[in-house]
């Protein structure tokens, strides 16, 4: 199917939108009327630009309040249609989208509507144009694609067909199997939009909360697969109304949109003739977290790591890079003054510049990333450095693809320099439980789509949690075996912990490293002995635990003394210890799960309140 997108889906001027759409790899574009009206360029200039960019004009839209009118209103509507036909021919658009009427004087009489479209078909056909009729979910009389199909069949004109829109169908819970009755030859265009399930009026829902396929909760794949199986092979076009998208980068949203359509076709490929991508990468978990720092910045980081039980396990043989280890958790401190890490540090300050993810087949994962339009970072290294392909991730940090079957970089690239004995905590550390990444709210859905497109991970349901200074959106993406987990945190308000991190770091990035343990009390005792900067939890929190849960008094006292948070659900229980942030940047968590797969949302408010006590005083 030809991939297309409506210009309303991205931000910027019409020329900026067209450039971003072409760069993202789309073949077609729907010209939204308001975009053209607001453009200083003539239709002739826009038509030339569309051609020069290698695009086709999939449709001109929307033509509103057409059907069911009488007298002078009807005559004026047909005059308006003729003027728009002139415009379409200038733009090179063959198809017009007519959406069902909201006009207060429009009749819902099917016979009158059929007569209107039959005449419109005659006028369009005489110019070599087509008209597609679409049911708006909030249409005055026509709000169901089954009604539209009945009208199109009754009109029975070669220039009149149906336009389907996944939002209008699925938001009204119209059965997908109703598409089986539609002749694919009469489908002018299929518009695609996902959305979260919300309880609100359809117009507001549509105008503010549409998103890319795979970012919402609609059965987009099943809808498109049904049409493809029926023989539809026309344009698949995104029409997205979303306030966050309109506030964000046109290039990023266009790339997301193209990627989402590729993923839809991949999902339905076993049942259609769509070409297959290399499969999503099987990942077994984070291999390392790398910090970019100067020597002066590295000293407090070393002190913090040592207070958490990490040992400096080795120094790089050729670079100013250190390897710190606790159990199976590997931290890299990169103090190079040139190269990627140094450049990243100049832009973002001392922060996580890269993460490693262990995958079964790095070459296939890299090929998939390239096919999905992800930015591959060029890496050319000489021994003793191991080849490790990388792509740009959240906040422009790198994601290194580490070969699960290859040699260990810790033994090949690093040399032990009088490393001390492992800390007693080593025996209780299983690895990295998850990484939390904070980002602007507008970026949130982009990075969710990025991870789910690249790795064999899926998203959990999004939730909003209360920071003392505003709301933040949380959503985990995780592998089926939970070996790889990312918690995505979208900052709404400017003074939340996530927002302060973003402002300090000049962009999104890793803010929180969660370490898995099998004995939280052993961790608490060891951290206290090492003088770790533990986040102090209010005594009121533990008093509330005593009221909510049946916890033995002596256990509760140990939790209180160790500043251990706790939650319980049907599937088990969880214990957590947090550190304070290093220079208001990254912080650590130790987490013990006992049959508990969630992220302890019940503790988030208490934890954020504790962390907010260390924020800088607000200026008047």
Image: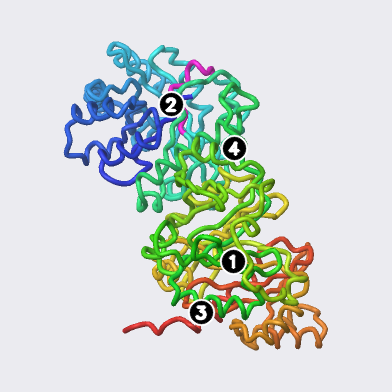
Of mark 2 and mark 3, the one earlier in the sequence is 2
Residue extent of the magenta highlight? 183-191
Query: How far is mark 2 from mark 3, CA to CA?
Result: 76 Å
Q: Which residue is mark 2?
A: 109
Q: Which mark is residue 364?
A: 4
Q: Calculate the distance from the C-alpha at mark 4 to the C-alpha at mark 1.
A: 28 Å
Which of 94/576 is in front? 576
Using the image as rendered, state which of residue 525 and residue 205 is in the foreground: 525
Name the front one of labels 4 and 2. Answer: 4
Residue topped by disc 1:
323
Q: Earlier in the sequence, mark 1 or mark 2?
A: 2
Q: Residue at x 35, y 20 (%)?
A: 116
**First along the sequence among labels 4 and 2:** 2
Q: Report the mark closest to the observer, 3 or 1.
A: 1
Closer to the eye: label 4 or 1: 1
Under circle 3, the secondary element is helix
Mark closest to the chain's N terminus, 3 or 1:
3
Q: Are marks 1 and 2 in contact (CB under 8 Å)?
A: no
Question: Is 367 a magenta residue?
Answer: no
Answer left or right for 555 relative to 476. Answer: right
């Amino acid at each position: 199917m030809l991939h297309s997108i409506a210009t309303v889906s991205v931000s910027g001027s019409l020329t900026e939108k067209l450039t971003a759409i072409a760069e993202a790899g789309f073949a077609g574009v729907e010209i939204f009327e308001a975009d053209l009206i607001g453009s200083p360029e003539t239709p002739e200039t826009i038509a030339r630009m569309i051609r020069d960019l290698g695009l086709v004009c999939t449709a001109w839209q929307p033509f509103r309040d057409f059907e069911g009118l009488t007298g002078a209103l009807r005559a004026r509507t047909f005059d308006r249609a003729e003027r728009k036909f002139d415009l379409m021919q200038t733009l090179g658009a063959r198809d017009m989208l007519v959406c069902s009427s909201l006009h207060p004087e429009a009749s819902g009489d099917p016979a009158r509507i059929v007569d209107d479209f039959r005449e419109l078909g005659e006028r369009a056909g005489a110019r070599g144009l087509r008209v597609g009729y679409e049911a708006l979910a909030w249409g005055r009389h026509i709000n169901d694609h089954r009604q539209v199909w009945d009208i199109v069949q009754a009109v029975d004109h070669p220039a009149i067909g149906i336009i389907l829109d996944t939002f209008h169908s699925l938001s009204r819970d119209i059965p997908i199997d109703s598409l089986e009755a539609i002749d694919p030859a009469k489908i002018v265009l299929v518009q695609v939009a996902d959305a979260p399930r919300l309880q609100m009026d359809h117009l507001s829902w549509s105008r503010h909360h549409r998103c890319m396929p795979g970012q919402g909760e609609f059965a987009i794949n099943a809808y498109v697969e049904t049409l493809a199986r029926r023989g539809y092979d026309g344009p698949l076009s995104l029409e997205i109304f979303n306030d966050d998208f309109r506030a964000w980068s046109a290039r990023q949203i266009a790339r997301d949109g193209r990627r989402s359509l590729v993923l839809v076709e991949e999902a339905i490929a076993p049942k259609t003739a769509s070409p297959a991508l290399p499969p999503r990468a099987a990942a077994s978990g984070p291999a390392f977290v790398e910090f970019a720092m100067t020597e002066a910045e590295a000293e407090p980081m070393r002190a913090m790591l040592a207070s958490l039980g990490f040992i400096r396990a080795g120094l790089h043989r050729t670079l100013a890079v250190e390897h710190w280890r606790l159990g199976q958790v590997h931290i890299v401190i990169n103090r190079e003054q040139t190269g990627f890490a140094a450049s990243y540090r100049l832009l973002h300050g001392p922060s996580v510049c890269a993460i490693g993810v262990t995958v079964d087949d790095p070459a296939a994962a890299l090929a998939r990333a390239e096919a999905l339009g992800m930015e591959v970072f060029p890496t050319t290294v000489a021994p003793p450095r191991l080849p490790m392909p990388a792509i740009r991730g959240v906040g422009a940090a790198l994601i290194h693809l580490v070969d699960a079957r290859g040699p260990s970089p810790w033994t090949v690239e690093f040399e032990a320099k009088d490393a001390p004995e492992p800390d007693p905590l080593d025996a209780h550390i299983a690895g990295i439980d998850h990484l939390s990444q904070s980002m602007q709210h507008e970026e949130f859905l982009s990075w969710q789509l990025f991870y789910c497109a690249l790795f064999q991970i899926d998203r959990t349901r999004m939730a909003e949690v209360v920071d003392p200074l505003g709301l933040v959106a949380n959503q985990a993406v995780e592998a089926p075996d939970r070996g790889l987990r990312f918690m995505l945190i979208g900052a709404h308000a400017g003074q939340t912990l996530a927002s302060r991190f973003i402002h300090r770091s000049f962009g999104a990035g890793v803010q929180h490293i969660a370490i898995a343990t099998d004995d939280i009390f052993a961790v608490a005792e060891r951290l206290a002995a090492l003088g770790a900067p533990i986040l102090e939890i209010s005594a009121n929190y533990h008093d509330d635990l005593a009221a909510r849960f049946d916890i033995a008094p002596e256990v509760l006292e140990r939790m209180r003394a160790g500043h251990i948070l706790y939650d319980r659900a049907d599937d088990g229980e969880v214990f957590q210890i947090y550190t304070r942030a290093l220079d208001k940047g990254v912080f650590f968590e130790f987490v013990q799960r006992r049959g508990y797969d969630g992220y302890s949302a019940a503790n988030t408010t208490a934890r954020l309140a504790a962390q907010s006590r260390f924020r800088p005083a607000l200026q008047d």
